[in-house]
Image: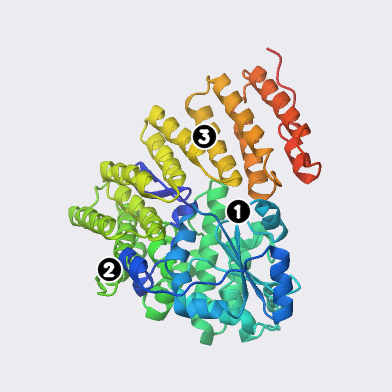
Amino acid sequence: MVGATGCVRSRTVVPSLAVIGIVLIGCGGRAFESGAAAATAAHDEIVWHAGDVDSAFAAARAAGKPVLLYWSADWCPPCSRLKATVFRSPEFVARTKLFVAVHLDGDEPGAQRLGEQFDVYGYPTVVVLSPDREEITRIATTMETAQYVHALDLALAASRPASAAYAAVLGGAATDADLRLLAYYSWSQDRERLVAEPQLSAALKALEAAYPPHLAVEKSRLFMAFLAAHAVAAANQGKTALLSGDELPWARVRLREILHDPALIEANSLAVVYGAHWAFAMVAQPADAGSAALAAAWEAVLAGMRADPASSAVTRIATLYGTLCLLGARQPDHAPPAPLVRAVHREVREADRATDDPYARMTLFSVAYHALSAAGLYDEAYDFMTREVERSHSPDYIMLALARWTQWKGLPPEALSWAERAWREARGPATRFERGTAYVHMLAQLTPDAGARIEDTVIALFREASKAQDAFYLRTTRYLHRLENYLRAWNADGTRAPSMARIRSEVAAICGAMADAGPSRTTCRTFLANQAPEPAI
């Protein structure tokens, strides 16, 4: 099963923190830093531009440098991984001195409007732009440090932007430099700049075919990007991710090539670890010798990563998680093997004790939560998460994970309590609106007859959001529409028409009173405005 879930074992689904089960942290052999190392190692720091975005581009023009734009939020685990590892690497920090580095936090005043201008969305997004604001490339954010450094070098050396490089591929005139640039492009965050989303997986398959043999590493990255795009598309459509026709044997051959080549494993380390959950499901068939052989090769690679003396605790936990996913896919009705369960318990416990750095802990949380759950250690997973609420620098994120986890476990009161706390204790206008939307969704699912509570929560969300600078742009707009869809589903039979009418009336008044008379107010006013009249009751 592929979707917003973790490993499948029997009929049990482990709730996930990320789309298609990809825990959004970096991984792979030596690329992981342990929490202790990240916390104690001496490191340089990136010099972020101190002024606003306009002054950053002015500085870039004056210095003849490109701009490195980093879009993030304080709570996001992959942002924490970057801060704990890549952003502390002397090599990476040295490269950033060749750019004007700009950090744009999604909860800062006006940030969502700026994010819309730069066409970013997911956290983190790393974009390289020319001094005149032309986008050169957006860099994949799930890589190890050496790959990040290489990606920055490619951006610095690029003779044309990624969009022109892709056009050159389509025209049969691409250079090796074009192909290398595109191999490190963040296709999952393209936002239809190069390829329309419905055509993304097909476009990536065709692009992969254009890579010559001497660009084997780059070709393998495009292949894994194709698999990820296909998995996301299948999940969004509620379809099976299993490949069909000629794609199935082709994909198996390509995966075997990657799993037997250390350089290709290193180039695709995240997908190798977490592909045990989502990519394997795309090529595996029950009682099939080819599937069993592929799984055995995959397990051997993960075991090798785990046995590497240089591997960190996070690496070991992540590979245990991947192994459990593989076993669960092959033997869904079997309990996790006791040795693997004990290993997960031991590794998480030791890493928990050794990791103090707040950013490293967020990275640890993401992988430990999944591994404990996949091992069937549900009480330990819950205890680990509840302890993390007190330690985390972004407890609202942990609370939301707990809300979804307890909902999955069939504990509605606890789920609602955690979801409400996540909303009330979140910081920053964009994040607070997102957490509030998740809370309303859970209210509608678990207590659909609590009309007054749902009404009051929605109205409170808009009342608060309307006071923020540039309130309804980008992510907040996306969540506004998501909230609207949740409410429409809640009132699908028309029995909650009075509540919908009150919400629509109150929100319309709030939007009309907004100080911002521009697009933000217009977006606010669209909320439920186009809904068909509710049936009379």
Badge 3 marks a residue whose secondary structure is helix
Mark 3 Cα-neighbour bin, 10 Å: few <14, some 14–19, many ≥20: many
Q: Residue at x 58, y 69 (%)?
A: 48
Measured as percent of width and height from the top left, residue 248 is found at 48, 64
Q: CA distance from mark 3 to mark 1?
A: 20 Å
Is label 2 in contact with label 3 (beta carbons under 8 Å)?
Answer: no
Q: Is residue 249 above or below residue 402?
A: below
The amino acid marked with disc number 1 is: Gly
Query: Residue 481: x, y in percent?
Result: 66, 40
Give the quadrant of the C terminus. top right
Tell me: 325 left or right of 515: left
Evaluate whether residue 37 shows in this view: yes
Q: Earlier in the sequence, mark 2 or mark 3?
A: 2
Which labelled disc corresponds to residue 306?
A: 2
Q: Earlier in the sequence, mark 3 or mark 1?
A: 1
Q: Quadrant of residue 191?
A: bottom right
Q: Amino acid at mark 3?
A: Tyr
- Residue appearing at x 73%, y 79% in the figure: 62
Q: Residue furthest top?
A: 537
Mark 2 belongs to which amino acid? Arg
**Distance CA(mark 1)–CA(mark 2):** 36 Å
SS for dot 1: loop
**Residue closest to the far front:** 50
The numbered disc on residue 439 is 3
Residue 43 location in percent, x, y? 42, 74
For the residues carrying marks 2 and 3, which lies nearer the camera in this image? 3
Q: Which residue is mark 1?
A: 106
> In the figure, 130 relative to 475: above or below?
below
Q: Residues within 10 Å of mark 1 (few under 14, many from 20)?
A: many
Q: Is residue 167 visible?
A: no
Residue 496 is situated, as x and y percent measured from the top left of the image, at 62, 19
